[in-house]
Image (cartoon, rainbow, N blue to C red):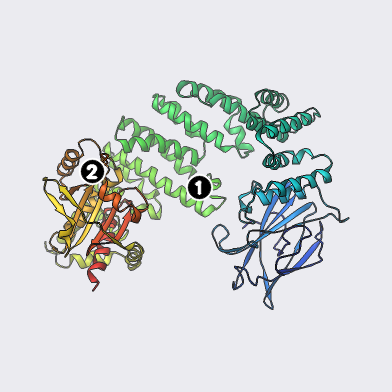
């Protein structure tokens, strides 16, 4: 992790100024912490959550130059205690520390002195209290540091008396709150006053500061945000005029123009406002010295992309991709072209033409690190996300190419897929198979099918094709096919699946029920005493439910000749003439399912069996699979991974585990 202001250090801190510790957990040398000086300590965790930790870690936070700075630190063990030292920054005024074990973002254990925190004042070289130190303590105590890294240093408290006492000390120390600390002070002062009194107090303090003149852009930006918070329209007009007069090309001016030109605007009005904004604040100019306002351009380009796409301004739509980063370009493509693919509406030929121009832009910028901000500067995670996004966009492009009969054009883009994306998507694998067949590339078909099986991303049609290939190589016989198929799945994948299934095993009593089937006859759960029964809760309006049907059909076919296993599809949470709709859909799609209709409640809600299992599910989401044995729900799983073969293997694994029970 990056070290912001000093090298590795270790320190343990008193809970607050001049107060004795509740337990002797540290010894300072020297006892007074001074700016620009080195300090050492001895930390004894006995009695705390880290008493038995073999490898405690620590994060230090220093308030210096009116900002919080954090850095990870290490500890050295000696005679049961932990030792360390630290060089304090020249302008430090306050310091805090958190001990933890494990990962910083998700620690296994934390020692923050039972929520009281370890923090301490830092004095100057003349041993005088430094302005801002009491504000820093109040901010830490209340959780108003504006720095997520300081979360869990203490258990935040909004104790008005404590906050007011600290603010009075700061007022006495500073005589007059300096401009750079004004808004930190106001944030804390608001906690001690009524809304009406605070509004008058803040407006008076800010107006007096404005009369002094000599404004920095940062100060005017803070005033603007505060007046907006106070809903002071007159004050807002005054400060915005000052921004445009003194800093017309500043980030604050950019934000104000962005808001004025786009807020509450749609369609042509948004288009005009956004285009005017880009003329006033060109994107390429911003890129030369980017600040924290990338979201403005992301929002502008995303909105323009939708407007151009929906209004048929295709050249303008394509033109957006010329200079923007991967993150923004990916989102514009996803929202418009991928959404068009999923909906199956619109001019698919046009979509393919647009995609053919845009995809090269995306591939060119795939590694531009534009997702870093979304993953807290974790480059590996950011790139993994970018790779996943390009896999999804390539799927859309290949889908369009296949639909337009450009099989050679589709085939050349498979090489750009990531290792996970190359064979991990069952639908894309099915497209790949179709493309190879259309191109008569028979030599590539078997490797594709075998790799897809290894990735457990296979559709029913692909299984049929693989069996055909196998039989063609074995004199038309399928002897040994199942063994061949089993060997294609790596052992680690099988073990991973088994571990996943075991983690979802339950033991929950089923309330008996009777439901109507597709033929109007009643089916009772009491008749399943000698069976293992799989139930899939689904609805005609649920897209993931429908997408999972090929996997459920694979399961049905696998156990079709096993009288000890049954599979039922229970339609739930549906409306209108749901019986006719669900029965017709199943039959029209040629699925061979045992269909049941969930029971209707007193208010007409069709969800009674599903609702009876709500305490187990702790969720109302579908699709939801359960497996019943001996009147108990023994397995429960929510959602759909996207792979028919993976779904079949998941449920088959659970069935075989239950079969093996004595």
The spot of residue 415 in percent (x, y) is 37, 50
Q: Is residue 619 left or right of residue 516?
A: right
The spot of residue 83 in percent (x, y) is 71, 71
Q: CA distance from mark 1 to mark 2?
A: 53 Å
- Which sits earlier in the primary sequence, circle 1 or circle 2? 1
> Among all residues in the image, which is located at the extreme right?
126
The spot of residue 245 in percent (x, y) is 72, 23
State the residue in front, 75 or 318: 75
Examine the rendering and report whether any part of residue 372 can be seen: yes
Q: Is residue 457 left or right of residue 312?
A: left
Q: Where is the N terminus found, in terms of image quarters? A: bottom right
Which residue is the site of mark 1?
367
Q: Are marks 1 and 2 in contact (CB under 8 Å)?
A: no
Q: Which mark is residue 236?
A: none
From this view, report whether residue 368 is shown above or below residue 449.
above
State the residue in front, 531 or 10: 531
Examine the rendering and report whether any part of residue 559 can be seen: no
Please identify the quarter of the rendering in which residue 54 is found: bottom right
Helix, strand or loop for disc 1? loop
Q: Which mark is residue 600?
A: 2
- Residue for point 88% across, 55% down: 126
- Residue for point 43% across, 30% down: 306
> Among all residues in the image, which is located at the extreme front?
602
Helix, strand or loop for disc 2? loop
Q: Mark 1 vs mark 2: give the one in front.
A: 2
The 10 Å Cα crowd at callout 2, few under 14, some 14 to 19, many 20 or more, is: some
State the residue in front, 431 or 624: 624
From this view, report whether residue 51 is shown above or below residue 307.
below
Q: Where is the C terminus found, in terms of image quarters? A: bottom left
Q: Is residue 191 left or right of residue 329?
A: right
Q: Is residue 323 left or right of residue 436?
A: right
From this view, report whether residue 19 is shown above or below residue 400.
below
């Amino acid at each position: 992790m990056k070290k912001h202001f000093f090298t590795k250090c270790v320190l343990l801190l008193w809970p607050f100024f001049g107060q004795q510790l509740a337990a002797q957990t540290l010894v300072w040398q020297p006892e007074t912490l001074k700016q620009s000086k080195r300090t050492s300590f001895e930390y004894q965790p006995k009695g705390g959550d880290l008493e038995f930790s073999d490898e405690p870690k620590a994060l230090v936070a220093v308030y210096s130059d009116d900002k919080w700075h954090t850095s990870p630190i290490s500890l050295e063990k000696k005679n049961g205690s932990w030792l360390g030292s630290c060089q304090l920054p020249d302008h430090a005024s306050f310091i805090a520390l958190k001990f933890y074990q494990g990962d910083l973002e998700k620690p296994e254990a934390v020692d923050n002195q039972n929520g009281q925190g370890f923090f301490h004042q830092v004095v100057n070289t003349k041993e005088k209290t430094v302005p801002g130190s009491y504000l820093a303590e109040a901010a830490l105590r209340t959780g108003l540091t504006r720095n997520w890294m300081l979360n869990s240093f203490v258990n935040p408290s909004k104790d008005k008396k404590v906050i007011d006492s600290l603010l009075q000390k700061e007022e006495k120390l500073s005589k007059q709150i300096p401009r750079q600390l004004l808004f930190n002070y106001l944030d804390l002062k608001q906690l001690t006053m009524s809304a009406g009194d605070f509004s008058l107090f803040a407006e008076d303090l800010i107006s007096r500061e404005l009369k002094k003149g000599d404004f920095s852009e940062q100060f005017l930006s803070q005033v603007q945000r505060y007046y907006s918070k106070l809903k002071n329209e007159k004050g807002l007009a005054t400060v915005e005029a000052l921004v445009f007069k003194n800093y017309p090309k500043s980030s604050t001016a950019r934000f104000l123009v962005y808001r004025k030109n786009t807020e509450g605007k749609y369609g042509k009005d948004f288009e005009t406002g956004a285009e005017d904004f880009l003329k006033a604040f060109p994107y390429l100019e911003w890129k030369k010295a980017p600040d924290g306002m990338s979201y403005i351009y992301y929002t502008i380009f995303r909105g323009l992309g939708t407007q151009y796409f929906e209004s048929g301004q295709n050249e303008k739509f394509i033109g957006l991709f010329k200079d923007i980063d991967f993150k923004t370009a990916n989102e514009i493509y996803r929202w418009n072209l991928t959404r068009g693919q999923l909906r199956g509406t619109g001019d698919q030929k046009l979509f393919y033409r647009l995609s053919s121009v845009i995809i090269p832009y995306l591939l060119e910028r795939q590694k531009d690190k534009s997702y870093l901000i979304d993953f807290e500067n974790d480059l590996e995670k950011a790139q993994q996300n970018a790779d996943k996004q390009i896999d999804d966009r390539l799927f859309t492009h290949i889908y369009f190419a296949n639909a337009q009969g450009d099989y050679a054009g589709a085939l050349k883009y498979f090489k750009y897929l990531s290792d996970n994306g190359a064979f991990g998507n069952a639908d894309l694998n099915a497209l790949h198979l179709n493309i190879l067949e259309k191109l008569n590339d028979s030599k590539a078909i078997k490797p594709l099918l075998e790799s897809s099986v290894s990735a457990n991303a296979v559709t029913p049609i692909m299984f049929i094709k693989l069996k055909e290939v196998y039989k063609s190589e074995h004199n038309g016989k399928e002897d040994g096919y199942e063994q061949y198929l089993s060997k294609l799945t790596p052992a680690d994948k099988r073990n991973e699946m088994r571990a996943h299934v075991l983690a979802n095993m339950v033991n929950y009593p089923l309330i008996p029920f009777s439901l109507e089937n597709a033929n109007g006859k009643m089916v009772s759960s009491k008749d399943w005493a000698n069976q293992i029964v799989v139930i899939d809760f689904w609805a005609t309006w649920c897209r993931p439910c429908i997408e999972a049907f090929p996997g459920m059909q694979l399961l049905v076919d696998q156990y079709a000749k096993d009288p000890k296993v049954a599979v039922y599809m229970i339609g739930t949470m549906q409306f209108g003439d749901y019986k006719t709709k669900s029965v017709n859909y199943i039959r029209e799609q040629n699925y061979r399912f045992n269909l049941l209709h969930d029971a209707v409640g007193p208010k007409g809600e069709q969800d009674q069996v599903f609702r009876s299992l709500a305490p187990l599910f702790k969720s109302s989401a579908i699709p939801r699979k359960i497996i019943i044995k001996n009147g108990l729900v023994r397995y429960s799983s929510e959602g759909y991974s996207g792979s028919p073969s993976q779904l079949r293997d998941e449920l088959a694994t659970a069935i075989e585990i239950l079969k093996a029970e004595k």
